[in-house]
Amino acid sequence: MKLHVEGLSVRFRLPGAVVQAVTDARFTLDQGRCLALVGESGCGKSVMAHALLGLLPANAAVTGHAWLDDLDLITAPEQVLARQVRGRRIGLIPQSPAAHLTPVRTARAQLAETLRELGRPDTPDALARRAGLRPADLDRYPHQLSGGMAQRVANALALAGDPPLLLADEPTTGLDRPLVDATMAELRRLCDEGRSVLLITHDLRAAEQVADDIAVMYASRIVELASARAFFDGPRHPYAQGLLDALPTRAFTPIPGQPPELTRLPDGCAFQPRCPRATALCEEQPVLNEVACHHA
Amino acid sequence: MLEATAITVSYGRHQVLDGVSLTVAPGETLGLAGPSGCGKSTLARVLALLQRPSGGTLTVDGQPISRWRHRARQRTSIGLIFQQPRLAVDPRFTLLDVIAEPLRAARRPLDRAHELAEEMGLTGELFTRRPHEVSDGQLQRACVARALALEPRYLVCDEMTTMLDASTQAHLVTRIEAYRERTGAGVLAVSHDAELLDRWAGGNVRTWRHRPDVVVNGSGGRPEGTSRDVSDRRIATRPNAEG
């Protein structure tokens, strides 16, 4: 399994405006690796995940390619995505698992339905055991599950079709630290099993626990792509440096200013108005070559 | 002092807080850490006069509280900032309306709303936007401005930055600390993030460690002995864990 994203762009047409949600994204995710896509809310990272699954609304225009082995997810017809890709080749670990589950049905009913739809011979009990749940827990309704158990049910659902690639879209939102740690350890275990994980998060500390590689997204573009170790030892893009410095375990100082609107992105580097190193050179859009900055 | 003594709260037959006491002094930043479901948010709601406890007393600067929710007389002395800004604002309001709402209710001059917005780093073109037109970070900035509008003596921040990126988190905490230093207000910072609280409250953190389905090591990078541990109190487990 290999995911190769090549020049992926997503635009949303709104009355009187165009939202540039993702611009010219390029990265490769190899088998058994975890790539964390980090950035603040509204930078376009969730849109990227939805584009890969073909789940964007009708006013979205997607260009470029996302090769999952030899299948282009962007041009693949809905029927192919529905019957061969979602749940089978790509599993989605959702944001806020408790809200993702159907509230009026037990965990067992939801696992059984998923297995039936995917045509898998497994039983819900076997699937639950692999996800670290006791079969007795499956008779509970979502509101009777603790946060950790709901997370494991969501993981079990994502793994029901044995997909080689997992998309985890902000899987730690609202979880406390021990649960974040447990979720990250579980993602790491899935990688070590040979699956690939694309983790989308704003939580740098969660990313540090699990990722092999880090892609930093700012104002619709990937601005730095580095190995996790190199990134946390010394990020090169000024925005990435600012983000790390804002952590409470580091300087705890905010980046001045605010990110630009995705409807009104500047022609040059989008970080330029907030950047301590900005010069006239930054009027021109920097090209991503590990890092998209004229000064890095 | 914002002083809660022996607070007990039950939801139906499930007791969520059992005789919890907590004091926030003026000018102090106190961190309250603990896992999800341990009752932190319930205590925050009680301290913000949004919920009448079934037992115990609450006093604000020596005055005991007898009326809660809309009837609370000391309503304006305590500001509350919630975890999810989207659930905490009227979706029909513009950001400026959100910030001006307490000023309007208290019959204070409304032009203060502009200053508050600018202090929180909100720029002019955002003033007329509605919640669905802004990011979580921008909306939470407006919620912080709203909480500060009537210059409360105490601020309760319940998981204020959980949804936000590191830079916005650092920005909001910096603004709240500046407010505390300027006015001498007391701040209660509630979070499950021990590292954040340790930095924010300078080690002045109380930790709850009760939760049924997770083993908490409780270290979180914090040196032992810097927090006042209240794990000896009986904090009832969350209702759904009893199944």
Image (cartoon, coloured by chain):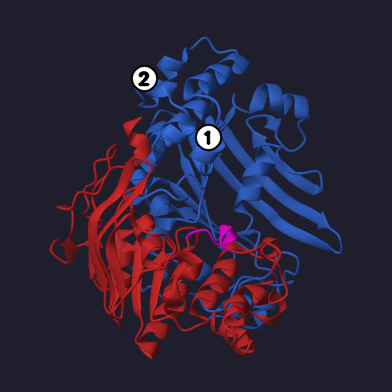
Which image quarter: residue B202? bottom left
* Apparent colour of chain B: red
Give the x, y percent position of residue B123. Answer: 65, 80
**Quadrant where the N terminus of chain B is found in the figure:** bottom left
Label for residue A251?
none
- The hue used for chain A is blue
Of residue B153 and residue B231, the one placed in the foreground of this image is B153
Q: Which mark is residue A166?
A: 1
Determine if residue B90 is in view.
yes
Q: Quadrant of the C terminus of chain B?
A: top left
At x 76% / y 31%, what residue is drawn? A76
The chain identifier of the residue carrying mark 1 reads A
Secondary structure state at the residue bearing disc 2: helix
Q: Name the N-terminal-most of marks 2 and 1.
A: 2
- Give the residue at mark 2: A136
Per the rendered image, the range of residues in magenta is B83-88
User: Is residue B13 found inside the magenta-colored segment of the image?
Assistant: no
Mark 2 vs mark 1: give the one in front: 2
Secondary structure under badge 1?
A: strand
Where is residue B7 drawn, in percent x and y? 27, 59
- The amino acid sitting under disc 1 is Leu
Q: Amino acid at mark 2?
A: Ala
Image location of residue B228, percent across then percent down? 17, 64
Q: Would residue A294 be found to the left or right of residue B52 on screen?
A: right
